[in-house]
Image (spheres, rainbow, N blue to C red):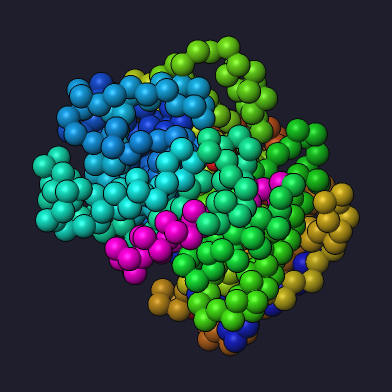
Amino acid sequence: MKARVTAHARYSIAEIDKRLYGSFLEHLGRAVYTGIYEPDHPSADENGMRRDVIELVRDLDTPICRYPGGNFVSAYNWEDGIGPKEERPTRLDLAWHTSESNQVGIHEFADWAASANTEMMLAVNLGSRGLDAARNFVEYVNHPGGSYWSDLRKKNGRADPWDVRLWCLGNEMDGPWQVGHKSAAEYGHLANETAKALRAFDDRLELVVCGSSHSNMPTYPQWEATVLEETFEQVDYISLHMYFENYEKNPREYLALPEKLDRYIGTVGGVIDYVKAKKRAKNDVRISFDEWNVWYHERKNDAERMKSWGWPHAPALLEDIYNFEDVLQVGCILNTFIRRSDIVRIACIAQLVNVIAPIMTAPGGAAWRQTIYYPFQFASRHGRGTALQLDVDCPSYDADVASGVSYLDIAGVHDGDAGTLTFFAVNRNADEPMEIALSLEGFGSARSVEHTLIKHDDLEARNTEENPDTVKPVTQGGAELSDNKLTLTVPAHSYSMIRISL
Ligand code: AHR
């Protein structure tokens, strides 16, 4: 199979916001306890945080981390996580039916985020609580001093405010499973009033209002229209979520799902434009795709187990073990975000450690990279700069979810400062290798090329504690560059990163 691709310096989509490569850590399962925090672990630092995990997160290079939920945040009292640890209450977490010891709260997470070289994106509880708890939390986190909450932060050991700019106004408030679920009108009103209060405190905050939990939600996309009509002038982003499933084990259908993601983004972009025009608004609202990932491997088992497990503390939950096929999927999802980077400014892989995550840990034992760690790391590290509008000519196939699905899924990024062009390419074809002819126009002279490949003959191949390197990238020879024309052949069902120095 052959594909012709042209990249031209003048045809660009947008400057990519580095927060497109954000992540997410929820008080859920073992994400926090025995994930990032394990005081008895041999690698624990003075705060009880696992250094081995911090290293893997630093290596992933994720610029923001959303916290503390997720569904968890909708019944969370942020004040439970401050002050002397021995005085913090154990609470029942209604979202996941577990016990929360509150040994990690905002101070511990903030210190961890600094060590892991990532910035905080925080969520307030608009489920069981509302405006007042939200404004107090923001004051605690961001006010320099001289007020009740900021002085309490100082008393609790943190003199300087953290100055967190990015705040989520609740989580998935369209979902009937959410504690404190609301109708679009109810939530829109509450989110707008909360946003006004937070802006009265600091107009520089960036606020994210909840959109739909999935494009399959019965309220989608009217939810977006109603919520934005209430909040448009007070918010900067609307949040979308999507998880990818492969219960049928059908790679053609599975790998076509990013087309659905693309439509979802396009539709919500249309709703944003409609509401902006209707309100004669001057400001822009963009998309924060702050939960996305593959989630199905353990989902049904988890739902069964949760029915009868009481209130355990930090049980194994949502511990999907990813396979090689998921590398291809995550590559296509990230490519979709790059191609939509004009409107998707923020995106967060859900989640970061142990819970549907690129990083896994064993309590008291090792930490290792899941298969999906690599495409995420490559995009995060090398997908920064200007997203390119590529011209792609390649055979396609029809799937149930979309027609005309290109066998080659490709995105390109030009980093003018570094003098590089990077292409991320997935061959969706199960049977045939793909000969790619890539023309580079208007970038000056291309000097050298490096091709990194992720390929395994078994779609089910996984990385485990015992065999952490079953699926991993290799540097590949064979790409030829001559006169700004690149040719290379990528194997059937494979992920490639192609880096060109200019
Ligand atoms: O990431 C797991 C859960 O998925 C989150 O808590 C929730 O927001 C979503 O439904």
Residue 238: x %, y % from top left: 55, 60
Taking the spot 56% from the left edge, 63% from the top edge, the residue there is 230
State whether residue 237 is above or below residue 291: below
Look at the image and say whether residue 404 sits in the magenta stretch.
Answer: no
Taking the spot 50% from the left edge, 33% from the top edge, the residue there is 355
Does residue 16 appear in this view?
no
Left or right of residue 181, residue 199 in this image: left
The image quadrant where one finds ligand 1 is top right
Residue 411: x %, y % from top left: 63, 66
Left or right of residue 237, residue 251 in this image: right
State whether residue 431 is above or below residue 20: above
Magenta span of residues: 190-217
Taking the spot 66% from the left edge, 55% from the top edge, the residue there is 223
Taking the spot 87% from the left edge, 49% from the top edge, the residue there is 400
The answer to which of 223 and 324 lies nearer the viewer is: 223
Residue 276 sits in quarter = bottom right
